[in-house]
Image: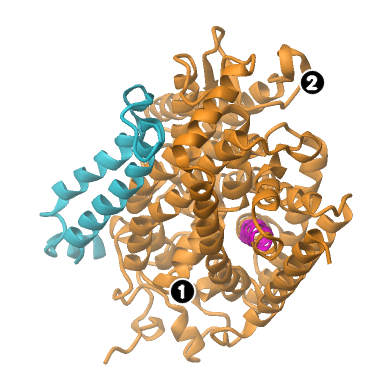
């Protein structure tokens, strides 16, 4: 048996075990019925601290972390490290915002950001627009995950598109059956494997002369390349691009529907807050992977067929024994499939809640909602495969940044909406549309430059707009600025013209309420067989004037000892 | 009516609001790029640029934990 066979065997066995786990997840924590959207789409909102931590980590620190970030530092050095500061800067913001999102979602039974924005500004149109934006932005992000998986297959010597399609097919079936429980359970298994990868990464570096040697060799390498943009440090002009990418990504990461899902599937408010406090621990793993990209440079790792995504798997192949490399590959594989599953569930929920139930079938029951979401999640996954075939960028991190530029445009409606209802619904819609137009127009005009400044591809070749002199600014931020200008100016004008604003269906206390509030709905009650209307209170249409208070008899109260 | 009752209720975490300002520190620390875009001082052979940003992660965990414990109701 060659080294390659051992790698392949370990990889295949571990992936098989994961798949079985994914199917078994439907029985995990025994839901009464997995056929309601609540149960399928947000895991019944009953995940405690540990599961939430794994799920948040599993869906946010993805194969992107382990494949795309090292690929970027391998290619350009310091600039690729931007993922670390952005992941850190986002946690304090998330600490405040995610708790508010948790509260309002549980008070009103929301499962998507679109519903939050729609209720806050009294506008089903805004809700639908946020949902569509979320779905469009999620697809390239899912693609990043699939590209990472493809890189693993390439390194293993399995060429072509079919292994990817098989993997996507299998994960789709498992998601289809088990909903959010599958990725939640797999995240735990993945993180156990991840510890192994991190430990072996540190060991490899220690045995190869330590970080001092690594950085010295990497510095020599970057000094030899003709590009002025790469190196161990940022160039003066490069700092602007770095900062705008950090700020843009930090704002966008929690605006994605899949981040919202992991948050509101938590059991209570403090679970969410404790988790944001613990999330920076993942940043350390992220930073280590970024530095491993430089280690790959120092050790002359050569990617397969110029595909930089294969840098991490190649590194493992060159420096680890076969069985250990197999474990590392399986980690990358699972790290790609978990977020792909969560993201497709989130995008599917957005479609079902803000579009299907709002416009197509207002009287859809919970079983129908869950069915529609399942099929929509399939569409999202295969849409992501289409994105890969259509865009094909140099760095897969660029795909994430392109998705980020799109999702950033929902920030005024969703994130600002969590703290203020000042904006006028029409102004927000105009701003969102302006932002999207600006973002897409700029992205369309960014060419992909090959070695020596040759244009490889005329459109969608990157995510930063060049202002000349090497100064690059992240397109997402430029578009967000245009978006905000329109939203603020529009609101002022509409208010002066006394155009009626939408009715805010939330109250200030909705954003701070916790699990001990009797108005908060819990899934435990549904599981305990208490619901008086089939499917539970969560399945009420959320976007309509909120009844002042439900009669005491229908309030789901959890009995406490 | 509910809003009315709500205002009359004591707000335990209102008094502790200043604590939230601590969150500015870990938000800004990874954003001051010109200050940390340098090689020295190194730590275990790792240039300042890299280990400073990793240290920011530890800082974020500590500060957020303090704010969480301090504002918990």
Give the quarter of the figure containing the N terminus of chain A: bottom right
| Mark 2 vs 1: CB contact within 8 A | no
Which residue occupies the extreme top position in the image?
Answer: A469
Provide the secondary structure element on which disc 1 rests: loop
Spatial separation of the CA atoms under disc 2 and disc 1: 47 Å
Specify whether residue A255 is in view: no
The answer to whether residue A12 is left or right of residue A208 is right
Q: Is residue A335 magenta?
A: yes
Magenta stretch, residue numbers: A328-344
In the picture, which chain is cyan? Answer: B
Q: Quadrant of the C terminus of chain A?
A: bottom left
Q: Which residue is mark 2?
A: A456
Name the residue carrying label 1. Answer: A47
Asked which quadrant contains residue A20, the reply is bottom right
Q: Nearer the viewer, residue A366 or A374?
A: A374
Residue at point 25% right, 39% down? B25
Task: Read off the chain for label 2.
Answer: A
């Amino acid at each position: 048996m060659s080294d390659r066979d051992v790698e392949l065997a370990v990889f295949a066995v571990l992936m098989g075990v994961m798949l079985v786990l994914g199917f078994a997840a439907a029985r995990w924590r025994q839901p009464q019925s997995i056929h309601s959207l609540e149960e399928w789409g947000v895991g019944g909102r009953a995940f405690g601290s540990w599961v939430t931590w794994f799920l948040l980590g599993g869906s946010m620190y993805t194969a992107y972390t382990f494949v795309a970030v090292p690929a970027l530092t391998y290619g350009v050095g310091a600039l690729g490290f931007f993922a670390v500061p952005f992941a850190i800067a986002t946690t304090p913001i998330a600490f405040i915002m995610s708790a508010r999102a948790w509260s309002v979602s549980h008070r009103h039974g929301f499962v998507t950001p679109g519903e939050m924005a729609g209720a806050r500004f009294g506008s089903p149109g805004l809700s639908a627009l946020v949902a569509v934006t979320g779905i469009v932005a999620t697809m390239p992000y899912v693609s990043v995950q699939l590209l990472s998986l493809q890189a693993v297959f390439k390194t293993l010597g399995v060429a072509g598109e079919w292994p990817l399609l098989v993997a996507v097919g299998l994960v789709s079936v498992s998601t289809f059956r088990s909903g959010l429980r599958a990725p939640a359970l797999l995240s735990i298994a993945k993180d156990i494997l991840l510890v192994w990868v991190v430990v072996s990464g540190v060991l490899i570096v220690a045995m190869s002369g330590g970080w001092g040697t690594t950085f010295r060799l990497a510095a020599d390498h970057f000094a030899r390349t003709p590009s002025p943009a790469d190196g161990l440090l940022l160039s003066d002009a490069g700092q602007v691009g770095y900062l705008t990418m950090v700020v843009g990504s930090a704002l966008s990461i929690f605006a994605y529907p899949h981040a919202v899902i992991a948050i509101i599937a938590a059991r209570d408010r403090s679970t969410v807050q404790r988790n944001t406090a613990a999330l920076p621990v993942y940043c350390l793993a992220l930073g280590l992977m970024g530095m491993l990209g430089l280690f790959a440079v120092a050790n002359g790792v050569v990617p397969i067929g110029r595909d930089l995504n294969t840098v991490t798997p190649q590194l493992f192949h060159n420096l680890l024994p076969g069985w250990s490399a197999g474990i590392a590959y399986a980690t990358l594989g699972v790290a790609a499939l978990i977020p792909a599953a969560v993201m497709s569930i989130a995008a599917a929920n957005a479609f079902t809640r803000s579009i299907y139930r709002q416009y197509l079938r207002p009287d859809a029951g919970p079983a129908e909602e869950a069915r529609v979401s399942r099929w929509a999640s399939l569409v999202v996954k295969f849409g992501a495969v289409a994105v890969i075939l259509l865009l094909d960028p140099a760095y897969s991190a660029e795909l994430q940044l392109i998705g980020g530029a799109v999702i950033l445009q929902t920030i005024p409606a969703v994130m600002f909406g969590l703290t203020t209802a000042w904006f006028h619904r029409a102004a927000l819609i105009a701003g969102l549309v302006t932002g999207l137009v600006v973002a897409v127009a700029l992205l369309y005009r960014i060419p992909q430059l090959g070695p020596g400044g040759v244009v490889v591809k005329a459109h969608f070749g990157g995510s930063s707009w060049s202002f000349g002199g090497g100064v690059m600014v992240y397109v997402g931020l430029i578009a967000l600025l245009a978006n905000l200008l329109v939203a603020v100016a529009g609101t002022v004008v509409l208010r002066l013209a006394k155009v009626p604003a939408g009715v805010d269906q939330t109250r200030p206390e909705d954003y701070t309420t916790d699990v001990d509030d009797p108005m908060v709905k819990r899934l435990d009650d549904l599981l305990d067989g208490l619901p008086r209307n089939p499917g539970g209170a969560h399945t009420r249409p959320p976007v309509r004037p909120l009844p002042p208070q439900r009669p005491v008899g229908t309030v789901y109260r959890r009995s406490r000892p | 009516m509910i809003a009315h009752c709500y205002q009359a209720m004591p707000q335990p975490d209102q008094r502790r609001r200043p604590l939230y300002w601590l969150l500015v520190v870990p938000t800004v620390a990874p954003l001051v790029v010109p200050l940390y875009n340098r090689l020295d001082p190194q730590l275990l052979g790792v240039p300042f640029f890299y280990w400073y940003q990793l240290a920011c992660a530890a800082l974020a965990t500590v500060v957020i934990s303090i704010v969480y414990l301090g504002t918990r109701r």
